[in-house]
Image: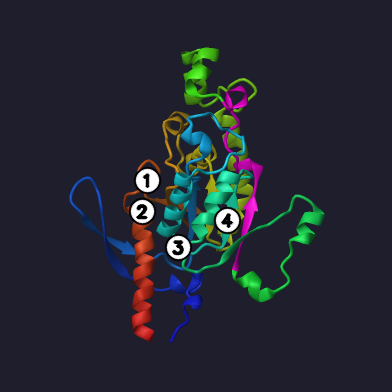
Amino acid sequence: MIHMGLLSRANCYSVRRNLFTVHATSSSPVANPIQIPSKDETALILIRHGESLWNEKNLFTGCVDVPLTQKGVEEAIEAGKRISNIPIDMIYTSSLIRAQMTAMLAMTQHRRKKVPIIKHNESEQAWKSSQIHSEETKKQSIPVITSWQLNERMYGELQGLNKQETADRFGKEKVQEWRRSYDIPPPDGESLEMCADRAVAYFKEQIVPQLLTGKNVMIAAHGNSLRSIIMYLDKLTSQEVISLELSTGIPMLYIFKDGKFFRRGSPTDPSEAGVYAYTRSLALYRQKLDEMFH
């Protein structure tokens, strides 16, 4: 019998099989052939946090640290179910609680049952105080790295205002310009371009090296920081990225292979084959292995 723990990234991807899955579309279901990713491929999962209390109230949130609503909690748990069969070795989140909650709640649904543990590197004392002194416990943990560079776009004087208050104070056309332009920031805030500068730089400097070493990575972050990363991954123009909308609590999957990113499922419609097909194919593969070696 093969222990399921041995189905690591290198092992469970070592055999390719043609599998079929049915996914729902606006038309009739279609069966698509799905290949198990090979051992030289790694997964990158992007999740926008679940609905926050200020999302619910339709307020500009930006970098204000607001928790999830009950709906947001449920969205995070559902996101976890959708990615429960995809290996995850490292998690990156912003420094804001709504993204951290989403990551933690999603991981409660993962089949490997590893414990996500936030790495406190803000000071030497914090790092020293949070060390784990059991190698076995470390093996059953997933490091969670928090970074302000993955924070939401900072909306400056718009933060805490609802749409009507904002329009009354600044004018409807000006607010629309701030929201839908790439390089024009609101007063004392960031443009999408400024958000992209920090988020993409962090992604390239800190996250890509982990993917290059074979780590499977999940990023739980925000609409604008994730749009910025998707702009880089999909080579979108500044005009294309401003029209990209990301749903709360919906996972998006990319495969990293030979230094390139391949999108599995559209960011604008991630309920299509991409995420579900990949998850389903891994589940079927493990089931077949169980049947073969029991």
Quote the CA–CA distance across marks 3 and 1.
18 Å
At 61% from the left and 22% from the top, the residue drawn is 157
| Sequence-earlier tag: 3 or 2 | 3
Query: Badge 1 is on which residue?
Result: 266
Q: Are marks 3 and 1 in contact (CB under 8 Å)?
A: no
Please tell me how crowded label 4 is: few (under 14), some (14-19), or many (20+) other residues with Cα within 10 Å: many
Q: Quadrant of residue 155?
A: top right
Please tell me whether mark 2 or mark 4 is closer to you in this view.
Answer: 4
Residue type, label 3: Ile
- Which residue is labeled 4 in the image? 91
**SS state under label 1:** loop
> Which numbered disc, 4 or 1, marks the residue closer to the eye?
4
Q: CA distance from mark 3 to mark 2?
A: 12 Å
Residue 105: give x, y in percent of width and height.
Answer: 52, 55
Mark 2 closeness class: few <14, some 14–19, many ≥20 residues within 10 Å:
many
**Residue placed farthest to the right in the image?**
125
Using the image, determine if residue 184 lies above or below residue 86: above
Q: Is residue 219 visible?
A: no
Separation of marks 3 and 4 at Cα, in angstroms? 13 Å
* Residue at image mark 2: 274
Name the disc covering residue 86, or none.
3
How far apart marks 2 and 1 lie (CA) works out to: 7 Å
Residue type at numbered disc 4: Ile
Q: Which class describes the residues within 10 Å of circle 1: few (<14), some (14-19), or many (20+)?
A: some
Let me know if residue 34 appears in the view. yes
Q: Bounds of the magenta span? A: 141-160
Q: Secondary structure beneath disc 4?
A: strand
Mark 2 vs 4, N-terminal side: 4
Kind of residue at disc 1: Ser
Mark 2 vs 1: CB contact within 8 A: yes
**In this picture, is 244 found above or below 212?**
above
The answer to which of marks 3 and 1 sits earlier in the sequence is 3
